[in-house]
Amino acid sequence: MNLIFFDDPEIVINLRPFTFTRPVSDIRMGILTIREKWHLLLNEKRSSNYTEPHLSSKYPMHVEGFNLCINSFLLPNDALLQAIKSLATNQMLFKEDVWLAGIFTDQLQSDFDECNMKPFEVIQYTGEVESFSNTWDIFSLCGKELVKDFKLLTSGRKSQPLSSTNTIIGDPALIFLEPGAKVEASILNTNAGPIYIGADAEIMEGCSVRGPLSLGEHSTLKMSAKIYGPSSFGPYCKIGGEVNNSVFFGYSSKSHDGFLGNSVLGEWCNLGADTNNSNLKNTYAEVKLWHYGKKSFVKTGLQFCGLMMGDHSKSGINTMFNTGTVVGVSANIFGTGFPRNYIPSFSWGGAAGFVPYKLNDAVATAKLVYARRNMVFDEEELNIFKHLFSLEYPG
């Protein structure tokens, strides 16, 4: 079966700035991305995307034979998995008026406009739908998804041995080390949830960790880091200082002291030494976040909500982020004082004001950052940058 993830346009806008640079299926929810969850559960090794035009070159849609299309904002559970597996060709699965999944053949057009719905038999799903639709859901649902992913990844498998230099509080069976993972002289507490250490990841000496926690492959918790779950760090991250209930998609760093709480960082971000964020207002009032579609701040329903930072954005030393700050793609923030709590993509500056971060300079930095991981900032990445820059600075 050929697997395709469909991005709902409204959800895409809700999840900005993270969906500026990736389809919804590549958002990390728990240990795994949406795509990775479904690959494992459906025993599929590849998939493609029906997503925004500016991402279609990097994430092209592939239509071939019998195509299973899944709404990418869905979080899998057993009942939904069975309902999708039970679908026949030309059947579509709905929850009331929300489209969940469908199977179509390559005889149909390769887009998903209204005319393509007509040949389908509609099946109403009566079970519970688990999904996410806002940026703050990424950290709010992290714990629940992390526990599910831990079971999915470790069931029937044996962890690598844990060094005797560590102190374990809680059930040691809830600590799982992939091959090459290293943990020394740290405190690991599983009373609130499991701790998953990816391949070749390392927890250095003196760290204090409360689950649920996921540390992705080749990632590092620096010495004496204090990590409160639920938190999830994707591959090639470096984490230091104090972190509470936060998600790093991957390839991002907070290597030094400073506090980060109830926050989400995309890829290729870097927080300078002693960067701090507020995750609670002095008034204890509900936090509002910038919404790219409404071009205004919207209520989150949360009392604790910190920083939402898009890919390639960075902060200088001693940067302070106020409660509920949204940073776009490839912004560079520095200087004293609190910058405003919405920072557009390709912004350069801080509390004293911002100027455009020149596209050529932003690209030059991205190329250097990629090269450190032996990766290439190619023409597809460049075209995405050009498109996003034109959204902020048209003409």
Image: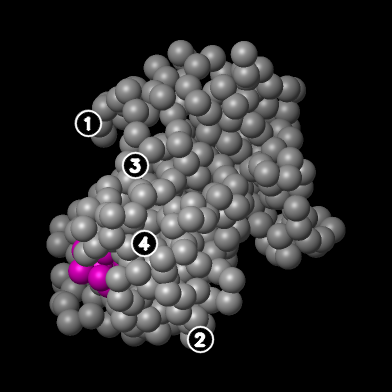
**CA separation in Å, label 2 and label 4:** 19 Å
Q: Specify the amino acid type for callout 4.
A: Cys
103 displayed left or right of 248: left
User: According to the image, label 3 marks what residue?
Assistant: 59
Mark 4 residue element: strand
Q: Can you give x and y, in whole percent of width and height, for residue 261 in the image?
A: 58, 56
Rounded to the nearest whole Å, what is the CA distance between mark 4 and mark 3? 15 Å
Q: Are marks 3 and 1 in contact (CB under 8 Å)?
A: no
Answer with left or right where residue 197 lies relative to residue 100: left
| Mark toward the start of the polypeptide (2 vs 3) | 3
The image position of residue 248, as x and y in percent, is: 44, 51
Q: Secondary structure at mark 3?
A: loop
Check contact, mark 4 vs mark 1: CB within 8 A.
Answer: no
Q: Amino acid at mark 3?
A: Tyr
Q: Which residue is mark 1?
A: 374
Inter-mark Cα distance, 1 to 2 = 47 Å
Q: Which mark is residue 126?
A: 2
Identify the image quadrant of the N terminus.
bottom left
In the image, residue 5 lies in the stretch drawn in magenta? no
Q: Residue at x 68, y 44 (%)?
A: 293
Please tell me whether the stretch drawn in magenta is mainly helix, strand or loop: helix
Q: Of the residues under marks 2 and 4, which one precedes in the sequence?
A: 4
